Image (spheres, helix red, strand yellow):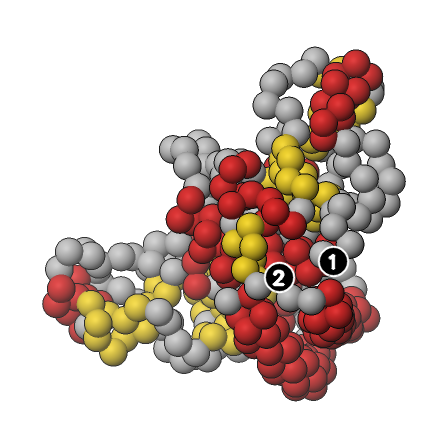
Amino acid sequence: MMARLGDVCDVRDGTHDSPTYVSEGYPLVTSKNIVDGKLDLSLVNYITFEDYCKINERSKVDVGDIIMPMIGTIGNPYIVEDFTEFAIKNVALIKFNNSQIQNKYIFYFLNSEKFKKYILKNNRGGTQKFLSLKDIRNMEINVVPLQKQKEIVERLDKINFLISARKQQLQKLDELVRARFVELFGDYDLSHAKNNWKSISEIGKVVGGATPKTNVEEYWDGEYRWITPAELGADSGYIYDSLRKLTKAGVESCSLQEMPINTVILSSRAPIGKVAIAGNTFYCNQGFKNIICNKDVLPIYIYTVLLLNTEYLNSLGRGATFKEISKSIVENIKISVPPIELQNQFVTFVEKIDKSKFEVQQSLEKLETLKKALMQNYFG
């Protein structure tokens, strides 16, 4: 049975006024405090008791309610899990006075692709997007019998539990790599280099890239792999392909230098510190300062050192509009160069861990695909 969300739930909103902020008082939750389905009160403004009471006359938040940003990061619902006294501003409040509606069922609906598409279609505003209370109330939802709701929630909860468990496994495997690195090599903090450490220019060649003119068709859709920082994750491991490719004419137009297999790829801006290893030959845009290693160091060793020093790499950024690390800055970074035998031991260990990570990652992807299919089936 299709029904309006406002007909099966009590949908309200918090204040639209500007209450008085104080150094100590009651938290005022806004969209910035609801992140990835969690409530973060570490950066919250506080209001007076009088303002708190005024807002809560019509928008008191109780355990089991759902709160959801209406401005900025629209959607992103959170189920209130424990009793914390706070008020809300520009946040939708969904209360459950209907015994035939389960809050977790509505929570999953508000995370569905159907609701995301509804947001895109109905949001208003310019730079600051918002969704009106009327639009939230008018959103149609498929209301199934309570027992069916419970079954749907139970199944999605189980899948979410398994997804979380797989992500924790991947995190623990990464922690094992870090622990083994410290065991073999000791200090990896590049911010306090020792006298016997070598500069990157001594152990490899630093190369960058460029972007051929995008309005020249003959430069694009060829066979030469060309990457940008946006294509990398924080910890990409080996990469083998790119979203866009260049023709020979595109490569020659910028005199691009090819990065051979096993080049350590390092993003130098937007953002600084993404790392990967080239599993194929690549070209790149100007957002990289990549390292072609010599015989003294193994790519996985350099890759891991950089991965463990993202904060330091960001501290080296220069520029007013956006931070960037230059070729000379990368070349002058000092790094410990242990015996190649120790590096080989580390590589062997990482290869074993990578096999385990691959299996866990495959399981994670299957679970996420299953969840996506179920969400589509349940909510459209």
Q: Which mark is residue 143?
A: 2
In terms of depth relative to the viewer, which is nearer, 284 or 72?
Answer: 72
- Residue type of the residue flagged with mark 1: Gln
Work out whether 49 lies above or below 43.
Answer: above
Report whether residue 271 is seen.
no
- Residue type of the residue flagged with mark 2: Val
Q: Percent position (x, y) of residue 296?
A: 57, 74
Q: Which residue is mark 1?
A: 100
Q: Is residue 115 left or right of residue 306?
A: left
In terms of depth relative to the viewer, which is nearer, 300 or 115?
Answer: 115
Q: Percent position (x, y) of residue 114?
A: 49, 60
Which residue is depicted at the point 27% across and 64% down? 256
In terms of depth relative to the viewer, which is nearer, 75 or 162?
Answer: 75
Q: Secondary structure at mark 1?
A: loop
Which residue is depicted at the point 55% across and 73% down? 377
Q: Secondary structure at mark 2?
A: loop
Location of residue 319 (image quadrant): top left
Question: Which badge, 2 or 1, comes first in the chain's sequence?
Answer: 1
Which residue is depicted at the point 71% across and 16% down? 21
> Mark 2–mark 1 contact, CB under 8 Å?
yes
Q: Percent position (x, y) of residue 291?
A: 47, 65
**Residue at the outermost right position:** 83
Which residue is depicted at the point 21% across and 75% down? 222
Q: Is residue 94 left or right of residue 227?
A: right
Work out whether 237 lies above or below 230.
Answer: below
In terms of depth relative to the viewer, which is nearer, 321 or 189?
Answer: 321
Q: Would you call the spot at circle 2 few (<14 residues within 10 Å), some (14-19), or many (20 or more)?
A: some
